[in-house]
Image (tube, coloured by chain):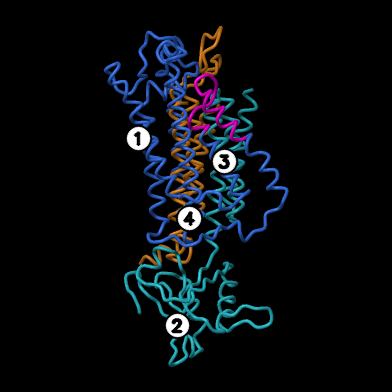
Amino acid sequence: MIKKISLLIILFIMLILFIQMQFDLKGYLNYFSHEYFLSHTYKDTASSNIVTGIYLDYRLFDSIFEASILLIVVSGIVYMTTKEGEENERVFIFEKVKISNLLTILSRVLYPFMLMFGVYIIIHGHLSPGGGFQGGAILATAVLITYYIDPDKITKFSLIIFLEKLLFISILIISSLSLLTKNVLFTNFIPNQTSNTYRSIFLILLNLLIGIKVSLGLVSIFSSFLKEGRS
Amino acid sequence: MVIIANLIQVLLIAISISIVFSKDNTRVVVFLASFSLLSACLYFLNKAPDVALAEVAIGSAIMPLFYILSISKQREFIVMSHVDDDYLKNEKNQKGKGYLLLENFTDYYKLKLYIFNDAEKAELKGIFRKSNVDLIIEKDESTNTYFLIGKQSSILMNKLAQLVENDDKTIVVKVKESETRD
Amino acid sequence: MNPILSFIIILIGIYGICTSKHIIKSIVCFNLIQTGTILLFLNLGYSEEGHIPIIGEQIEKIVDPIPQALMITTIVIGSTITALALILSIKIFHYYGSLYWKVVFDREG
């Protein structure tokens, strides 16, 4: 009981300090970066969506390390759940629970629409809200629906991991291709003089690669959850 | 618009307080899904539609699935048997002696019982770490006694040893992680 | 909108981590802290007359786009870190036989 009361007192002191800091913060805020991004982004990166322009051109270095963290976590999870040696037959949880017909038929109807929506969000990432990360997550939920339709749809587990490594290497190669054409690392590799429609090819390509990589990573995490301790 | 945003934020605080003070784990997961759905609305009111899309797809669809899968994995008791006689028989009229014992034990802890029959003697080295087996059952043919082999670190083995205390034919053996017994 | 209300969510998450008895519940409290942090960051760049950061006609002011670009990566990384913690909790259950912090610390010795 004494521990909880002392914890509450410490949290209350933190709240008071935060309110005090909030008044001091007003002096430091300025609006310089808002005007800069509004006037320069379309000229520099050829994307209408400023957020996509930031994480695919100005701060591409951050996005590459984000993708590498995803790869490291997925490989750690796969290392902890798989057993070396020959593969036994897998026992999925959906085999024991009887799934109702309504759910399977509805998910069979919904599946192509979800795929279409995910691909739309990825490809329109530089024009409207969306992009590689969000579209990849929607694609992952679309693939997870196939577990309801057919429990052993995804059988080649090692192929998914191999594809993910390949996609990460191709993201690295495409983003460092600008060293040859512009002499600068990690920007758009198509020269500045060409029209904006051609320059947005780079954005669409990187969005597609990141989207497929994120969806494959989430699917492999899910299927290693199902396999855990069973094979 | 400001009133709606403040109201949603007060609702978020109420949901988080009920998460901290609730005792049921599956109810916590449902609360978490509704929490992230409401916070996605709040991101959109903050004029950030990209973040709201990411939160709807990941926070309220994929993460509760992970939680529910891991909670269902934590209610299992996996038994691997090398015995092929009536000891672990499970039919309508007659249940084996060992099956009754294990059923009694798992009902006490509210676990689910899975029994894998493995006729061939597999290699025992490192099997606990790799494939999450909780208990191994073996039989000594000459003296007709059964051995229940489990981990020393698990707290469930103490209760199992208490259950079979006055039975001569079954013996509970506790093994350390690095030892092998053959 | 109000930064003090979103800081209270972080404080509730810290209280939950310090007092929870079950491992799953302390993982959930990490997610609460993550949501509170995202709300604080989005609030830094918010302005009343700003527009959604997409370039169009007749737009003079926008919201600050840098915190939004950082927060998208936060959500994706947070989900994978949660999955790693859940896998570790399954391993802990099969090793110690229970998921309460008290039992785990007693068995550890």
**Secondary element at tag 4:** helix
> In front of the other: label 2 or label 1?
1
- The amino acid on which the numbered mark 4 sits, given as a three-letter code, is Ile
Name the spot of residue C55 as percent of width and height, x first: 51, 13
Q: Residues within 10 Å of mark 3 (few under 14, many from 20)?
A: many
Chain ID for orange: C
Measured in 3D between alpha carbons, the distance from the residue under mark 3 to the one under mark 2, in whole angstroms, is 46 Å
- The amino acid on which the numbered mark 3 sits, given as a three-letter code, is Thr
- The amino acid on which the numbered mark 2 sits, given as a three-letter code, is Phe
Judging from the image, mark 4 belongs to the subunit labelled: C
Q: Are marks 4 and 2 on the same chain?
A: no
Q: Give above or below for A112 relative to B108.
A: above
Marks 2 & 1, CB-CB < 8 Å contact? no
Q: Residues within 10 Å of mark 1 (few under 14, many from 20)?
A: few
Chain ID for blue: A
Q: Give above or below for C26 relative to B133.
A: above
Q: Which residue position holds label 3?
A: A141
Q: Residues within 10 Å of mark 4 (few under 14, many from 20)?
A: some
The numbered dot on residue A169 is: 1
> In front of the other: label 3 or label 4?
3
Measured in 3D between alpha carbons, the distance from the residue under mark 4 to the one under mark 1, in whole angstroms, is 37 Å
Measured in 3D between alpha carbons, the distance from the residue under mark 4 to the one under mark 2, in whole angstroms, is 33 Å
- Which stretch appears magenta? A114-135
Q: Which residue position holds label 4?
A: C23
Name the spot of residue A208 as percent of width and height, x first: 47, 29
Q: Which residue position holds label 2?
A: B147
Q: Residue at x 42, y 10 (%)?
A: A43
